[in-house]
Amino acid sequence: MPRDLDTPPPERLFLPGPAGRLDATFERPAGNARGLVLHLHPHPELGGTRNNNVVRHGALGALEAGCAALRIDFRGVGKSEGAYDQGVGEVDDAEAAFDWLERQGPGLPVFVWGFSFGSRVGLELAGRLAERVAGYLAVAWPTRYYSWPELSRWPDRAEFLVGDQDEFVDLGRMAPAARHGAPVRILEGATHFFPGQLHEVRAFTARALERWLDAEGWAG
């Protein structure tokens, strides 16, 4: 994937997780970070990893917005320890990564970003840590395969991106997002992995983060 940002090289890390170490990539923006973003990948049993192209373009969007980006492999993926846990333990993995990321920039807002399975895990995490999550971004929330979680509190800020040709998304089941005041952007012609439209994932991520950062006066 071509990089057009003058940023430091990615760092390969192993983070402590509840089922063992988590393989991760941490990327910093060119200047002082305005925020921090945790990126969560698609389904582990369908080949999902932190190096998925949609996830990587989401990370580029975060860097473009002046945020540091952390991508993790869930338990049992790549060199992350443990085994797939039906999306339950994966929320715990995400929380451990969120805790680590929060410590990298005390006082900076921390956002959660997820693609497909990772967006479902991310929403559960954002509900669990609602007081600490500055915002939640979801790409291709897979409504054909998962029901919406029962959350005691939705994140204060949330936005969704879905393709109108996505085989994993039933647009008629996106209503809960709108009911909670979360904008849903529908991208014409896009299928699940956004072939030919990955730049739209990056732009969606960058623009949403920039709006939130500017609105709250988070300058880094």
Image (spheres, grey):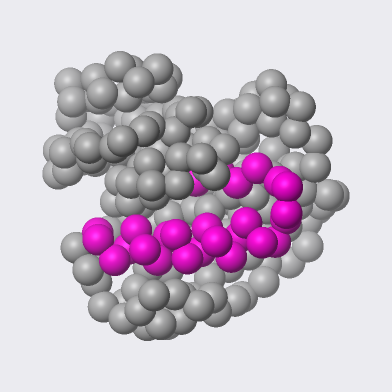
Where residue 156 appears, x then y in whole percent? 48, 28
The N terminus: image quadrant: bottom right
> Closer to the camera, 153 or 161?
153
Where residue 193 appears, x then y in whole percent? 35, 45
The structure residue drawn at horizontal position 39% and vertical position 75%, both measured from the top left corner, is 18
Whether the magenta-drawn stretch holds residue 88 is answered as: yes
> Closer to the camera, 200 or 148?
148
Going by the image, does 128 lie left or right of 106?
Answer: left
The structure residue drawn at horizontal position 69% and vertical position 31%, both measured from the top left corner, is 213
Where residue 188 appears, x then y in whole percent? 36, 22
Give the total number of marks visible in the rendering. Answer: 0
Q: Which residues are magenta?
A: 87-113
Whether the magenta-drawn stretch holds residue 68 is answered as: no
The structure residue drawn at horizontal position 53% and vertical position 31%, both measured from the top left corner, is 204
Q: Quadrant of residue 50?
A: bottom left
The structure residue drawn at horizontal position 47% and vertical position 65%, both measured from the top left corner, is 96
